[in-house]
Image (spheres, rainbow, N blue to C red):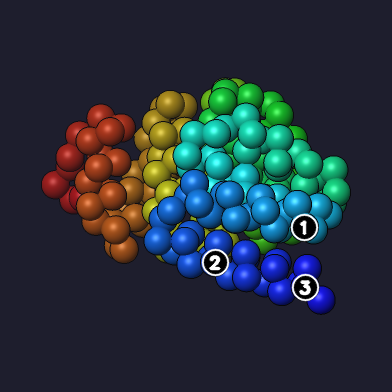
Amino acid sequence: MIKKIKIFLLTSLAHVVSALDKNYLAAHLWLKASKLEPQNTIFLTTAGEHLWKINKKNYSINLFRKAIILDKCYTPALFNLGYALQKKGHYVESIVLFTKIVKIDSNHDLAFYGRGISFFKTKKYENAIDDFKKTIALQPMSPYAYYQISHVYSRLGKIDELKKIIIKVKAFEPQVADQLKRITNWIVISDF
């Protein structure tokens, strides 16, 4: 009973300090909770997220791996590890992790998005397009996937597709559409 109360107090306080963006303290509290309940993947993953934010990247990655050992289908740990490896330039490994997530949850838009970025970085452009399209289908008003797919179309010289994306984005995020025109070296046409 005392252990449950300690865990409740630690995690409650961790949530509060997280909201205040006190990542070092939040990580410390989540780690303390995980010592009381070492099989809890949520505690490990959340501690890892906060450690990542304070630049304790390797420690963070180890916690994500530990959570995955405990539960190979725990998508938050899979996603965070995929993201962390992607940021370190390990794109093939991140593709594997993001693929595991979409097999578990075919509506995980961030996994499709993350995998699309890794596909782009490994020059698997058609795969990247497919994943960004899936992200758009799941989150049609979020400009991030439109932004990324525009870069792929630009890289491939698919101007007609690029133009369609920019027109679509202009309907709900005109500033992003203008930025895409500039970034992709789009020549502004009067009918745009």
Q: Is residue 105 left or right of residue 155?
A: right
- Viewer-nearest of labels 3 and 2? 3
Specify the amino acid type for callout 2: Leu
User: Label 1 vs label 2: CA separation?
Assistant: 15 Å
Residue 104 at x, y percent in the picture? 79, 55
Q: Is residue 21 left or right of residue 187?
A: right
Circle 2 is placed at which residue position?
Answer: 13
Give the farthest residue toward the front: 2
Give the farthest residue toward the left: 190
Callout 2 crowding tier (Cα within 10 Å): few <14, some 14–19, many ≥20? some
User: Label 3 vs label 2: CA separation?
Assistant: 16 Å
SS label for mark 3: helix
Specify the amino acid type for callout 1: Leu
Earlier residue among tags 3 and 1: 3
Pick the residue in front: 84 or 33.
Answer: 33
Specify the amino acid type for callout 3: Ile
The residue lying at 69 percent from left, 26 percent from top is 92
Callout 1 crowding tier (Cα within 10 Å): few <14, some 14–19, many ≥20? some
Pick the residue in front: 6 or 105.
Answer: 6
Whether residue 67 is situated above or below residue 58 in the rendered picture = below
Earlier residue among tags 3 and 2: 3
Circle 3 is placed at which residue position?
Answer: 2
Quadrant containing the N terminus is: bottom right
